[in-house]
Amino acid sequence: MIKILTYLLLVVVASGCAAFKPVPFQLVDSESKIQRGTIIQDGQRIEVTVDGHLFSGFYIFASGAAISQAMYGRHYFPGDTITNFYSNSARAHLTSDNGQQLNCEFLFESARAIGQCRTPAGAVFQLSADGVSASK
């Protein structure tokens, strides 16, 4: 009985450690002004404050499926196959509390991200997150 309880306790502790942690990032504009934000992996959400306005929204990773069909009459080719592919390339659409928009494209892996965000007016921000320095 003690072994079972110990095992269950270890499972609970291990599952708590596996939870996604928010990833802090920064946006840097052309004048090197830094804005701070957070990538929230649970629910694929993203938030950043730019000039006092909170922008929030969601991000989606690139994914898809490729289908190959067998050549009829050729017995040495395999049958139909479906290949799913996933990428670390993400896009996000953010809206601010006053209706402004921000569109982002970035690569995201573990607690690191790099890319850029643009406003419809043409302002460009460099997006970067380095999970190593963010955890210090």
Image (spheres, rainbow, N blue to C red):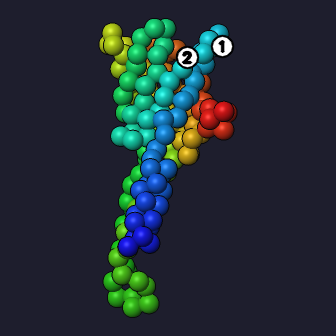
* Structural distance between the alpha carbons of marks 1 and 2: 10 Å
Q: Secondary structure at mark 2?
A: strand
Residue 113 vs residue 76, the one in the foreground: 113
Say what amino acid the circle numbered 2 marks: Gln
Point out which mark residue 63 bears: none
Q: Are marks 1 and 2 in contact (CB under 8 Å)?
A: no
In screen coordinates, is 69 left or right of 7? Answer: left
Q: Residue at x 50, y 43 (%)?
A: 89
Q: Residue at x 39, y 88 (%)?
A: 74
Does residue 1 show up?
Answer: yes
Rendering coords of residue 60 (x, y %): 40, 41
Say what amino acid the circle numbered 1 marks: Ser
Residue 76 vs residue 128, the one in the foreground: 128
Q: Secondary structure at mark 1?
A: loop
Mark 1 lies on residue: 32
Report crowding for label 2: few under 14, some 14 to 19, many 20 or more residues within 10 A (C-alpha): some
Point out which mark residue 35 bears: 2
Rendering coords of residue 6 (x, y %): 45, 65
Q: Residue at x 66, y 38 (%)?
A: 132
The quarter of the picture where the N terminus appears is bottom left
Does residue 125 show up?
Answer: no
Residue 120, by quadrant, is top left
Rendering coords of residue 30 (x, y %): 63, 13
